[in-house]
Image (cartoon, rainbow, N blue to C red):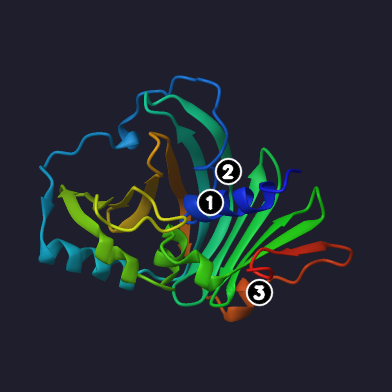
Amino acid sequence: MTGDAPLDALRRALLGVLLGLGAFGPLFALAAPPAAPEDLTEAAQPWASGPSVHARFLDRLHTLEPLRGRFEQHVEDGYGQRFDQREGHFALAPSLGLNWVTESPFEEQLVLNGEGAWLWDPALQQAFRRPLADLAGTPATLLVGLGEAWLEDYTVETQASDALERFRLQRAAEAELRPGAPAQLELVWIEGTLSLISVEEGTGQRLVLRLRALAPAVLSPSDFVFEPPEGTEVIDEGAAE
C-alpha cells in the first residue's frame, strides 16, 4: 500500500454515500450501461431553483427517518460507461451516524458518527480513522445531519413529477474548493423515499448509488460505534496534522 492509499480509500468511502465510495478511484475499464427507466436520466419537468427550492431540500433532509437497507453502486465516466460496481447493506440515523458495509466484490466497513469516521479493511486488518472536522463538505455528513453550512456554496435546483422529486446541487464557480466536497450532487426521492444519490467530483466521473429494500429502524448510538478488532493496525489520519 502506498503512502496515499489510506487517505484515498477513506475519501472514496466518504464521497459515495453518501458517503463516497469510489469517486476518487483509478481509471476504470469500459462497460456500457443498460438503458433502464430507473436510471432517471430524464424527468418530465424543467429544473427550478430559488429560496423555496433550497428550503424544500433542507426539509427533505431534516425529515429523513432512521432506516436500514441495501445499496448498489457504480462509477460512470463522462460517456456513461460503468465500472467499480459494489453492493452491501447499511444503517442510517440522522444526528447519530451511518454504518455502511460493503459485501461485494470485497468486504469493507465505513462507520461515521459525531466524532469522525472509521474505515475498516478486514483483509488487511487495518482501520483508518478521520476526525469529523476533516469531513466537512462531504455528502455523508450532509445525510447524517452533521454539517450543512457548506451548502451555501451550492445552487439547489429541483425537477419533480407525480412520483419523483429530484434535487441537483451545483458548486458555484467562485466557491472555495473544500476537500471531499463534490462538484455536483444529486438526490432523488421516489414516492417519498430517498432512492438514488449521485456524486460528481469535477473530472467527469460520477458515482451512482441506489438504495434498496429500505425499512424503518430503531437505531441507537451503539449502532454507530466502531471498536477495532484485536490485532488491528489503527491508522489515525488526523493524528499528525
Tell me if mark 3 has few (under 14), some (14-19) or many (20+) residues whose alpha carbon lies within 10 angstroms of its own. Answer: some
Task: Check the image and report above or below for 31 versus 63.
Answer: above
Q: Which residue is mark 3?
A: 225
Q: CA distance from mark 2 to mark 3?
A: 22 Å
Q: Which labelled disc corresponds to residue 158?
A: none
Q: Which residue is mark 2?
A: 87
Residue at image x 40%, y 65%?
A: 142
Locate residue 212, reporting x and y percent: 47, 49
Q: Marks 2 and 1: which is nearer the front?
A: 2
The image quadrant that residue 1 belongs to is top right
Locate residue 37, reporting x and y percent: 30, 32
Locate residue 81, reporting x and y percent: 44, 24
Q: Marks 3 and 1: which is nearer the front?
A: 3
Query: Is 236 on the left or on the right of 150, as rendered?
Result: right
Residue 7 in sight here: yes
Q: CA distance from mark 2 to mark 1?
A: 7 Å
